[in-house]
């Protein structure tokens, strides 16, 4: 069907499709980072409050990386979240 509209329309559709695939992959990686961090936090510090869970779920990519590093070095749960 897109061939009827010419090569530009086909290229736009492919590019848009590639963007959607990339966004889906990024979202999947973000969700996996959140899942893993929550698991590490609960293994290290015990049951997590809904507030902590919400903070992790709302964190952007940079914050998740920072928190993931701190889960290894912090001696307390609050230490993981200091300055985040």
Image: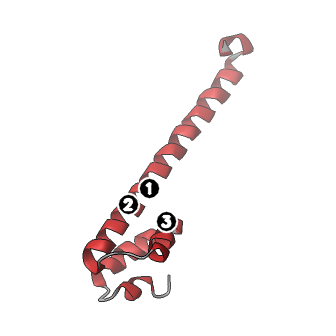
Residue assigned mark 1: 31
Instruction: Write down the quadrant of residue 36 in the picture.
Output: bottom left
Give how far across and how far down residue 46 sits, in percent: 29, 77
Left or right, 5 with reference to 34: right
Q: Position of residue 28 (x, y in %)?
A: 44, 49
Q: From where the camera sits, is residue 38 visible? A: yes
Residue 18, horizontal then vertical, whole percent = 55, 35
The mark found on residue 35 in the picture is 2
Badge 2, how many Cα within 10 Å: few under 14, some, many 20+? some
Residue 60 visible to the viewer: no
Image-based side of 9 in relation to 65, left or right:
right
Q: Is residue 17 above or below residue 77?
A: above
Scheme of colours in the image: secondary structure
Q: Count residues near mark 3 (Cα–Cα under 10 Å), then give few for <14, some for 14-19, many for 20+.
A: some
- Whether residue 64 is situated above or below residue 3 in the rendered picture: below
SS for dot 1? helix
- As helix, strand or loop, the secondary structure at mark 2 comes to helix
Q: Secondary structure at mark 3?
A: helix
Please report whichever mark, 1 or 3, sits nearer to the chain's N-terminal start.
Answer: 1
**Quick one: 37 or 15, which is closer to the camera?**
37
Check the image and name the residue furthest to the left.
Answer: 43
Identified at 38% across, 75% down, the residue is 48
Is the residue under label 1 in contact with that under label 2 (CB below 8 Å)?
yes
| Residue 71 falls left or right of residue 7 | left
- The residue under label 3 is 57
- Earlier-in-chain disc, 3 versus 2: 2
Look at the image and tell me in which quarter the N terminus lies: top right
């Amino acid at each position: 069907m897109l061939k009827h509209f010419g090569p530009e329309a086909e290229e736009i559709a492919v590019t848009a499709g590639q963007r959607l695939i990339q966004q889906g992959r990024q979202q999947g990686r973000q969700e996996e980072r959140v899942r893993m961090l929550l698991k590490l936090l609960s293994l290290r510090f015990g049951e997590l409050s809904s507030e902590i869970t919400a903070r992790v779920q709302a964190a952007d990519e940079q914050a998740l990386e920072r928190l993931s590093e701190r889960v290894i070095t912090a001696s307390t749960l609050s230490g993981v979240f200091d300055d985040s």
